[in-house]
Image (cartoon, rainbow, N blue to C red):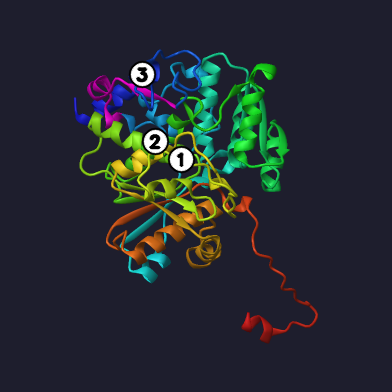
Amino acid sequence: MCHRSTAIHRYIQTKVTMNNYVSHLECGFTGERLTPNRVHALSPAGKPILVRYDLDRVSAEVDRDAMQLRPSGMWRYREVLPVREDANVVSLNETETPLVRLHALESRSGARRVDVKDEGRLPTGSFKARGLGMAVSMAKELGLRRLAMPTNGNAGSALAAYGSRAGMETYIFCPADTPEVNVREIALQGGKVWRVNGLINDCGKIVGAGKDRMGWFDVSTLKEPYRIEGKKTMGLELADQLDWRLPDVIFYPTGGGTGLIGMWKAFKEMRAIGWIEGALPRMVAVQASGCAPIVKAFEEGLRHADLWEGAHTIASGIRVPVAIGDFLILDAVRESGGFAIAVDDEDIAAAHERTPKEDGLLVCPEGAATIAAYEAALASGRVDPGEHAVLFNCGNGLKYPMPPSTAEIDHTAIDWDSIERA
């Protein structure tokens, strides 16, 4: 039987029964082993929990080429994801998100290749669909019916959508200045949503305080094991798209940091399985100068970050004054040989306005932060123009405020000179 025929045969087999390779859970800080297939929040040490797999079995039993015959999207990689039963997968038909080259930026900067991975194409318009789709699927598998979380916007809309899809109740708390479109989106998709006179960490305190009274499960960033497994699929998908060759450097907008941690976990798992070879990308944590606890900790050589007082930035998705997974973010950045960088709101705003005009790609403010950070790193020599860089745009730009456009014209007396001057 030829190689492709063998791959097709194995794919047909996987449609009948999909093996699960989860071996155990473990505390991301102490390494303490925990039993899978039970409801877990934080570890006994009060730290995030990571899912571990029998990677030797995956390597021996899962054919990478056969896997590529499946439909694209995050569920293509089921053997290195935690859901055991197909019936528990809660999906809104998550698509593979495209890599969009920034040709104008390349030409202007002399860079060889710069791609934006545009996560705004996912259901609910952001990369939060990956993490919350996985978390809700596992909540269904574990019998949970009521979920709650704090959000700066996009995570809440994803929880509301996937929770409604699964027939669950969702309770969502967001800072008072969360963009109106996000709050309305959450409500329209079935989430019970409240604005809070504080920041996201204050919203998180409400969720924690209500667990006993309301009986909800807290799906805050890294306070359960599975959102990271959904975000991990960004790394799996990126490798798949690039024919299992990874870029040199990845710029990632970092608030809670689940995606950066998840991608680094995915890269190490893929290398252990044998799906990829060679050097792994340098991971760059991008923050705003008005809220940069990870950057400060990185520059000071610390493994934990202090609470950032007076957090402010136009990129609300990365306005996270304290991250429970701070040590996991910093570990990934340092292990990869990467760095953490902060950019000013003025530079974020400039990139947000310039990118669609130059390259036709509408990005969110957090995505614009990665573009501004890449340009700053290129100018300072922290990144070489010959390196292949991938920048993550985490949300659909249509969700965010845009500059006004006020030009008008009288159809009865057209001023062609003013049109030409425009």
| Residue marked by disc 1 | 257
x and y percentages locating residue 131 in the rendered image: 50, 33
Q: Which of the labelled discs sits on residue 354, or is there none?
A: none
x and y percentages locating residue 329 in the rendered image: 40, 39
Q: Amino acid at mark 3?
A: Glu
Q: Which region is colored magenta?
A: 48-66
The structure residue drawn at horizontal position 71% and vertical position 34%, both measured from the top left corner, is 193
Q: Amino acid at mark 2?
A: Leu
Q: Is residue 37 magenta?
A: no
Quarter of the figure that contains the C terminus: bottom right
x and y percentages locating residue 87 in the rendered image: 51, 17
Q: Is residue 32 visible?
A: yes
In the rendered image, the residue lying farthest to the right is 412
Mark 1 or mark 2, earlier in chain: 1
The structure residue drawn at horizontal position 27% and vertical position 45%, both measured from the top left corner, is 245
The structure residue drawn at horizontal position 45% and vertical position 18%, both measured from the top left corner, is 44
Q: Amino acid at mark 1?
A: Gly
Q: Is residue 59 magenta?
A: yes
| Image quadrant where residue 262 sits | top left
The reply to whether dot 1 and dot 3 touch (C-beta < 8 Å) is no
Whether residue 162 is situated above or below residue 252 in the rendered picture: above
| Residue marked by disc 3 | 32
| Residue marked by disc 2 | 328
The answer to which of 154 and 245 lies nearer the viewer is 154
